[in-house]
Image (cartoon, grey):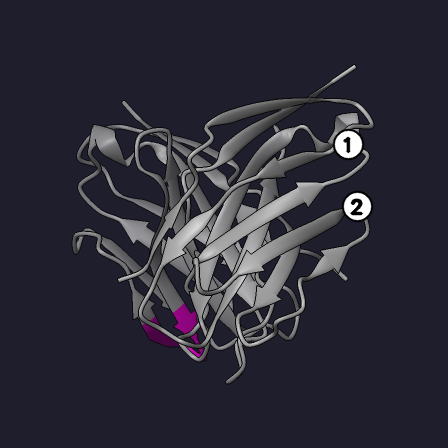
Amino acid sequence: KAGVTQTPRYLIKTRGQQVTLSCSPISGHRSVSWYQQTPGQGLQFLFEYFSETQRNKGNFPGRFSGRQFSNSRSEMNVSTLELGDSALYLCASSLGGTKNTEAFFGQGTRLTVV
Amino acid sequence: AQTVTQSQPEMSVQEAETVTLSCTYDTSESNYYLFWYKQPPSRQMILVIRQEAYKQQNATENRFSVNFQKAAKSFSLKISDSQLGDTAMYFCAFMIDGGGNKLTFGTGTQLKVEL
């Protein structure tokens, strides 16, 4: 069974640009959550999508957005990039039913903003 | 809001020895889950062990076990017979039951297993 796949693995962008990251969950999983990991702020929750609807949202500015497609694949978009957006972005997939189930993480996308 | 605190930024242990990582949390929720995740240098987060708050029995998973003290809001991880492959960053995390899959993480403990 394939794991959670995040693409691309590495990305370098310039300040002011926008970026889209992709996450393909494990087959059958309907929930995808996104996290930002930085040395200064640690691991912070961005948002969760379940059945194409945003179910939870963290405390990030509106420049951070996401969506989920009917096949459960999810994308997150960051517009008007800032240097502080440089981070490892992790996504996690889970079955996502009424009972919480184990979250499986991808290997992350390392975003560098220059 | 929930908070998770890991007060040990770094720890080291000799191979084959036992080490305990500490975690405390704060919440007003009564139903929740607690987790320990491991993040090796590859950066892939791997679930080590999970505890449901309504279960009094401490979870165990091979060489890994927890000491869950609900009243004290404490959730420590014990690693027995430490192996070199246990070297990693360990994160304690919290999730509300029925609140979707939203994890609140602690700041992590970097564990180094030495020969």
Residue at the spot of label 1: B82
Q: Is residue A65 magenta?
A: no
Name the chain under label 2.
Answer: B
Residue at x 40% of width, y 50% of height? A35
Residue at the spot of label 2: B63
Mark 2: few, some, or many residues within 10 Å (few <14, many ≥20)? few
Mark 1: few, some, or many residues within 10 Å (few <14, many ≥20)? many
| Prevalent SS, magenta region | strand
Task: Give coordinates of residue B16: x percent, y percent.
Answer: 82, 28
Q: Upstream in the sequence, badge 2 or badge 1? A: 2
Q: Residue furthest front?
A: B71
Residue at x 43% of width, y 58% of height? B73
Name the chain under label 1.
Answer: B
Residue at x 43% of width, y 40% of height? B6
Residue type highlighted by circle 1: Ser
| The C terminus of chain B: image quadrant | top right
Task: Give coordinates of residue B50: x percent, y percent.
Answer: 62, 61
Please state the extent of the stretch shown in magenta in the rendering.
A49-55
Task: Give coordinates of residue B17: x percent, y percent.
Answer: 78, 28
| The N terminus of chain B: image quadrant | bottom left
Mark number displayed over residue A22: none
Label 2 close to label 1 by CB (< 8 Å): yes
Q: CA distance from mark 2 to mark 1?
A: 8 Å
Relative height, residue A72 to residue B74 (above, below): below
Residue at x 32% of width, y 70% of height? A56
Tell me where residue B90 sits by quadrant. Answer: top right
Front residue of this view, candidates A52 and B34: B34
Q: Could you confirm whether marks 2 and 1 are on the same chain?
A: yes
